[in-house]
Image (tube, rainbow, N blue to C red):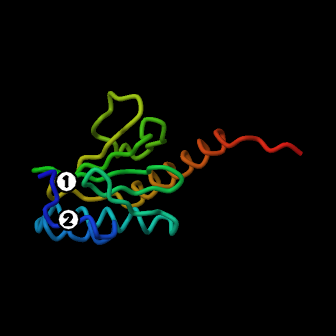
C-alpha cells in the first residue's frame, strides 16, 4: 500500500499526512500518528513534508521518512548510520552505510525517549553537515 489514494496535489503536507493516517484506518495509522507526534514534538522547527507519497520530516535536511507497509511502519533516518543509537532502536537497514531504519510491528511499544534522542541527533548531524558546507566568510 504505497500509493496514497486520499492525498491530492492541492493539500498541504500536514493535510496529506492526515489523509494517509485516516486512509490506513488500522494500527498502522495509529502508529504513524504516534510517531509523527513524537518527531514533531522533539523540536518546534521540524518541518513536515510530503515527498514520494510518504511523510518526510526535516530540519536543515531530511531527518526521517515514514512508510507504512502491509505488516509494519518503517521509519528510515537518512543518515542513521552516522547517528548514535545507545538504545539499539535501529532494527532494519543495518547493512547500509548511510540509512538506518526502525520497523514497527503491530503491538510494538515505542521507546519515546530513544526515538526523540535519535531525532535530536539527526538534527544535530544535519546542522553540523550544513556548517561544513557553508562558505567561510572573510573578515
Against 126, is 6 above or below? below
Q: Quadrant of the C terminus?
A: top right
Estimate the spatial distance between the alpha carbons at disc 2 and disc 1, rounded to whole Å: 9 Å
Instruction: Identify the residue position indicated by label 2 in the image.
Output: 20
Identified at 51% across, 55% down, the residue is 120
Disc 1 secondary structure class: strand
Against 44, is 56 above or below? above
Please identify, in this view, whether the residue under mark 2 or under mark 1 is nearer the observer.
2
Q: Is residue 57 left or right of residue 134?
A: left
Answer yes or no: do the residues labelled 2 and 1 have beta carbons within 8 Å? yes
Return the x and y of residue 5 as percentages of the image width and height: 13, 62
Disc 2 secondary structure class: helix
Identified at 38% across, 51% down, the residue is 64
The quadrant where residue 37 appears? bottom left
Instruction: Identify the residue position indicated by label 1 in the image.
Output: 68
Identified at 11% across, 52% down, the residue is 1
Could you say which is closer to the camera, residue 34 or residue 18?
18
Q: Residues within 10 Å of mark 1 (few under 14, many from 20)?
A: many
Return the x and y of residue 80 as percentages of the image width and height: 42, 40
The quadrant where residue 17 appears? bottom left
Against 36, is 98 above or below? above
Amino acid at each position: 500500500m504505497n500509493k496514497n489514494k486520499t492525498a491530492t496535489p492541492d493539500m498541504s503536507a500536514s493535510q496529506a499526512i492526515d489523509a494517509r493516517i485516516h486512509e490506513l484506518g488500522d494500527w498502522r495509522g495509529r502508529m504513524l500518528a504516534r510517531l509523527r507526534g513524537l518527531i514533531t514534538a522533539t523540536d518546534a522547527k521540524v518541518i513536515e513534508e510530503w515527498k514520494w507519497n510518504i511523510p518526510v520530516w526535516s530540519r536543515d535536511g531530511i531527518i526521517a521518512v515514514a512508510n507504512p507497509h502491509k505488516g509494519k511502519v518503517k521509519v528510515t533516518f537518512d543518515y542513521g548510520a552516522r547517528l548514535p543509537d545507545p538504545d539499539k532502536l535501529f532494527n532494519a537497514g543495518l547493512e547500509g552505510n548511510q540509512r538506518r531504519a526502525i520497523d514497527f510491528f503491530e503491538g510494538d511499544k515505542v521507546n519515546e525517549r530513544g526515538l526523540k534522542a535519535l531525532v535530536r541527533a539527526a538534527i544535530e548531524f544535519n546542522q553540523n553537515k550544513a556548517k561544513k558546507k557553508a562558505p567561510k566568510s572573510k573578515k
